[in-house]
Image: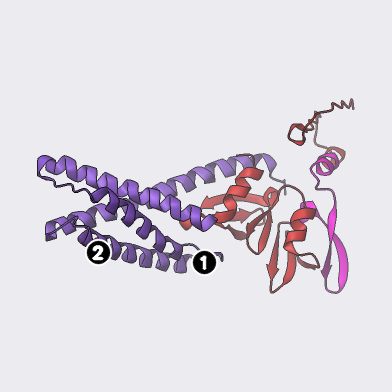
Amino acid sequence: MLVEYEQVSTIEEEKAVIKAVAKTSDIQNAIELLEGNAGGIAVVNGGSTYICKQNAIYYIESVDKRTYVYTKDNCYETKYRLYELEEILGAYFVRCSKAMIVNLRKVKSVKSDIGGRLETTLLNDEEIIISRSYVKEIKRRLEI
Amino acid sequence: MDKVKMLFQHTMMISFGILIGMSLEGVMYLNDIDFRWYHPLSVVVTSVLCSIPSLILYSERELPRNKFRIRIAIHFLLLFTMVLGLGWLFNWYSELEGALYIVGIFTFVYLFVWVASSWMGASDQKHINNALESIRDEE
C-alpha cells in the first residue's frame, strides 16, 4: 500500500485517510492504533488478571470506590480510577455521568429523556443514562 | 458555574414569557390597560426570583424518572405560588379575572419552556444518533 506523509502545523489539522478495498484485520489494527484504541487495560476477574482490549469495553462504572469494566457479556474490576481511565482510553471513551464512562463506539442509539438527559441503548441492549451535564462534551467529541 | 448559567438562562426565559403575557394583555385590552413605572422592574425581579426554584431540578446525581417528575410537580406549584404572590405584590391584577389571566399565562409559559426543551432534546438526539452511525463498532 502506498503511504503518504504530510507535515501539518497544528494538532487540529492531523488526519489519516486510509483508502482500501476492504476493512481487513490489518486495516482495523491500523485504525485502532491511530485512534489510540490499540492498548488495553489490566482487569481482574475471579482472581485472574487479564488485559481487556479497549474495543471490547462497553462502559466503565465506579461503585463504592471500586471501578468495574463491562464488556459485552462480562464484568471485570480494575485498579484504575475513572479520571485515570479518561486519560488512558481513546477519544470515544467519554464521561456520561459522575460515576460512568461509556464507549461511544458501543452505543446503538440515544433517546432524549425528561430533563435533557439521554436514555442510551448499547450494542448488547443494555441501557444506561447520559446525564444532561455531559451531553455537551459528548457532542463535542462527536464533532457536532 | 453550571448552576449560575442555568439560573441566568431560566431568568431570560421567564422574562420572555412574562413579556409575551404582558404583550398579549396589551393587545387584548388596548387603551384600558394601565402600565406603571415599576412594571418593567417587577418583570426583572420576578424573573430572577422565579429562576431560583430551578435548583430543585438541578442535581449532581442522576435522579430516577419518578423522583424527577415529583420535583417538576413541586417546581410547578412553587412557581405558581410565587407568580401569583409577586403578581399581587406588584399590582399585576386586582380581581379574580386578572388572577385567572395570570394563571393561564403562567401555565402557557411553563408548558412552552418544557416543549421548547423537549424540542431541543429531540434535535440533539437526531444529531447524536447520526454521528454515532459513523463510528459504531460492528458486533
Residue B82: where, in percent of width, then height? 29, 63
Q: Residue at x 27, y 53 (%)?
A: B42
Q: Chain B appears in which tint?
A: purple
Residue B46 locus on image (x, y percent) = 31, 56
Residue A43 shown in magenta? yes
Q: Earlier in the sequence, mark 1 or mark 2?
A: 1
Quadrant hosting residue B50? bottom left
- Residue visible at 81% across and 68% down in the picture: A79
CB within 8 Å, label 1 to label 2: no
Residue B100 image offset from top left, x and y in percent: 17, 58
Q: Position of residue A3 (x, y in %)?
A: 88, 27
Name the residue type under label 1: Leu
- Magenta run includes residue B86: no
Residue interval drawn in magenta:
A29-57
Q: CA distance from mark 1 to mark 2?
A: 30 Å
Q: Which is nearer the eye, B41 or A3? A: B41
The residue to which callout 1 is attached is B63
Q: Quadrant of the N terminus of chain B?
A: bottom right
As shown in the figure, which amino acid type bears the numbered disc 2? Gly
- Residue shown at the point (53%, 46%) measured from the top left: B125
- Mark 1 element type: loop
Examine the rendering and report whether any part of residue A113 can be seen.
Answer: no
Residue A48 visible at all: yes
- The residue pinned by badge 2 equals B85
Query: What's the residue at 72%, 49% (across, down)?
Result: B139
The disc numbered 2 marks a residue on which chain? B
Is residue B71 or residue A73 the one in the foreground? Answer: B71
Q: Colour of chain A?
A: red
In this image, A10 relative to B8: left or right? Answer: right
- Residue A110 sits above or below residue B94 on the image: above
User: Can marks 1 and 2 be said to lie on one chain?
Assistant: yes
